[in-house]
Amino acid sequence: MSKNKIYIVTMYRNGMRDNHSYVLGAYTKKALALSEADREENDRGGKYLSEILEYNPNETNTQPREIRGLFR
């Protein structure tokens, strides 16, 4: 299993995909992605929820793995 995973953190207003959204960042450490997502949710006063997807660029399967979904 490769260690070269990328974690993409996307923020969604009110946790809705059809509202405003933005990519908070791309991280190589899962713990950092989780902590930055938590920090941003708190800093935005709960108006935005985070989704974290894990990508492995070295695998042929291009489907990301959900680390944190919008529906928790």
Image (cartoon, helix red, strand yellow):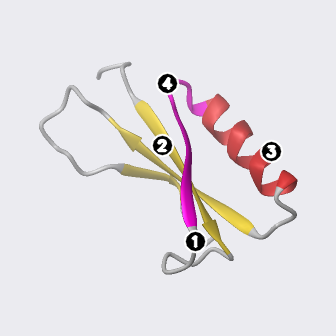
Identify the mark at residue 39; answer none if there is no mark: 3
> Label 4 near label 2: C-beta < 8 Å?
no
Q: Amino acid at mark 4?
A: Thr
Give the CA separation, mark 1 to mark 4. Answer: 25 Å
Q: Which residue is mark 4?
A: 28
Give the CA separation, mark 4 to mark 3. Answer: 17 Å
Q: Which residues are magenta?
A: 21-30
Q: Secondary structure at mark 1?
A: loop
Q: Which residue is mark 2?
A: 8
Q: Amino acid at mark 1?
A: His
Q: Secondary structure at mark 3?
A: helix
Q: Amino acid at mark 2?
A: Ile
Secondary structure character of the magenta stretch overall: strand
Q: Earlier in the sequence, mark 1 or mark 3?
A: 1
Residue 40 percent coordinates (x, y): 76, 49
Q: Earlier in the sequence, mark 2 or mark 4?
A: 2
Identify the mark at residue 20; answer none if there is no mark: 1
Q: Earlier in the sequence, mark 2 or mark 1?
A: 2
Identify the mark at residue 35; answer none if there is no mark: none
